[in-house]
Image: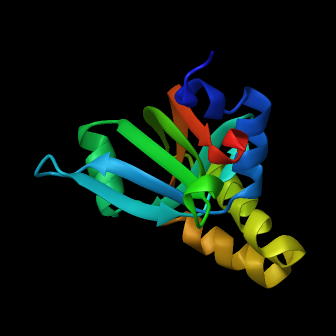
């Protein structure tokens, strides 16, 4: 008989669907003191990988320049029997190319704001923001997942 842990693991398709469905990625990097630095970010999936952008001068970028290790957590559920989540453990690839970072910004903006993100005003705003931002792609080494709804 499978263990409880084995019963709640998500399949690859379930992980992908969950990451498309949920909206907040908690990002953990290693701070200067060695403690975790955790922040919530909006994200998108591009070619199957999680991407997001942030200010080039942010603490998470300073942390990633020192050590590219990164963990992302997307979770959902209000009670134990509803808990679902995916932990993405990997390496952060910093994307400093303006056009590529801008494309990440556009993709994230469209995911969260819909077609309004393609308006001329939004496009200009994103273009200005891209001058101060860096894109991040999480290159996953492993996924840890759980879906307590599978326990019945």
Quadrant in the rendering for residue 90: top left
In the depicted structure, whether residue 152 falls above or below residue 131: above
Relative to the observer, which residue lies in front, 6 or 22?
A: 6
- Most extreme residue toward the top, as rendered? 1
Instruction: Give the residue at x 73% y 28%.
Output: 12
Instruction: Give the residue at x 45% y 33%.
Output: 89
Image coordinates of residue 71 in percent, x first then y, are: 42, 42
Image coordinates of residue 45 in percent, x first then y, are: 71, 45
Relative to the observer, which residue lies in front, 13 or 139?
A: 13
Instruction: Give the residue at x 72% y 44%.
Output: 152
- Most extreme residue toward the left, as rendered? 33
Image coordinates of residue 97 in percent, x first then y, are: 56, 46
Give left or right: position of 140 versus 107.
Answer: left
Residue 9 in view (yes/no): no
Quadrant in the rendering for residue 64: top left
Give left or right: position of 84 versus 46.
Answer: left
Residue 6 in view (yes/no): yes
In the depicted structure, whether residue 142 falls above or below residue 86: above
In this figure, what is the number of numbered marks?
0
Relative to the observer, which residue lies in front, 93 or 16?
A: 16
- Most extreme residue toward the bottom, as rendered? 121
Q: Looking at the image, what colour scheme do you see? A: rainbow
Give the position of the N terminus as an image quadrant: top right
């Amino acid at each position: 008989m499978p263990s409880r842990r084995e019963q709640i693991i998500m399949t690859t398709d379930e992980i992908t669907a969950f990451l498309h469905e949920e909206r907040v990625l908690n990002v953990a990097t290693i701070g200067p003191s060695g403690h975790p630095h955790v922040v919530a970010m909006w994200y998108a999936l591009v070619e199957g990988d999680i991407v997001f952008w942030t200010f080039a001068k942010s603490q998470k970028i300073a942390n990633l320049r020192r050590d590219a290790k990164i963990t992302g957590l997307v979770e959902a559920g209000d009670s134990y029997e509803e808990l679902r989540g995916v932990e993405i453990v990997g390496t952060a690839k910093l994307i400093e190319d303006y056009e590529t970072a801008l494309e990440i910004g556009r993709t994230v903006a469209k995911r969260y704001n819909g077609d309004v993100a393609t308006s001329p005003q939004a496009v200009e705003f994103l273009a200005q923001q891209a001058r101060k931002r860096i894109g991040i792609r999480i290159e996953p080494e492993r996924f840890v997942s759980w879906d307590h709804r599978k326990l019945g």
